[in-house]
Amino acid sequence: MEHGFDACVFTPVDTPSLTSTDLQTLIDAFANHRDQVVCAVSQQTPDHPEPLIAIYPVTLFDVIDRSIDEEQYSPRRLLRSLSIITIPLSAESCRNINTPSDLDSHSPQP
């Protein structure tokens, strides 16, 4: 356990429909799978893990550091080398807002 923490939660800034309930779902899954990356997947694309909507155990920080040192910056590539559990979330929760038109078509959840 590094600095008293078991894990680090990653969330991207461009997923405005990701809710606290979604994050709690990931946290609950991590409680039962503390040695694995708990990674969201969209229900529309269940074979496409979202590496930036995930919980990474601190025990993997050395692996992450090594990947960065080797200039391997792709989080998706890193995930392929790790033990992960995927948690389905709604497509809207996982939706990235990358362009003005994406933002225009975004409907905030109540």
Image (cartoon, rainbow, N blue to C red):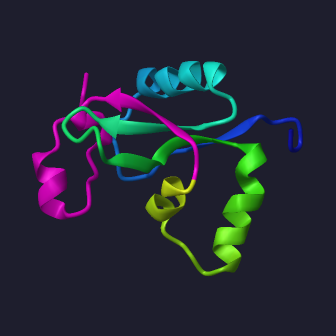
The N terminus sits in image quarter = top right
Q: Image quadrant of residue 33? A: top right
Magenta region, residue range:
82-110
Residue shown at 54% from the left, 61% from the top: 78
Q: Position of residue 77 (x, y in %)?
A: 47, 64
The C terminus sits in image quarter = top left
| Residue 97 among those drawn in magenta | yes
Q: Position of residue 2 (x, y in %)?
A: 86, 44
Residue shown at 12% from the left, 51% from the top: 104
Viewer-side residue, 93 vs 42:
42
Q: Position of residue 37 (x, y in %)?
A: 58, 40
Farthest residue, direction bottom? 71
Residue shown at 54% from the left, 72% from the top: 73
Viewer-side residue, 14 vs 110:
14
Viewer-side residue, 47 vs 5:
47
Q: Position of residue 54 (x, y in %)?
A: 51, 41
**Is residue 17 shown to the viewer in this render?**
no
Residue shown at 31% from the left, 41% from the top: 94
Q: Image quadrant of residue 100? A: bottom left
- Give left or right: position of 4 versus 64: right
- Give left or right: position of 34 versus 100: right
- Give left or right: position of 88 versus 6: left
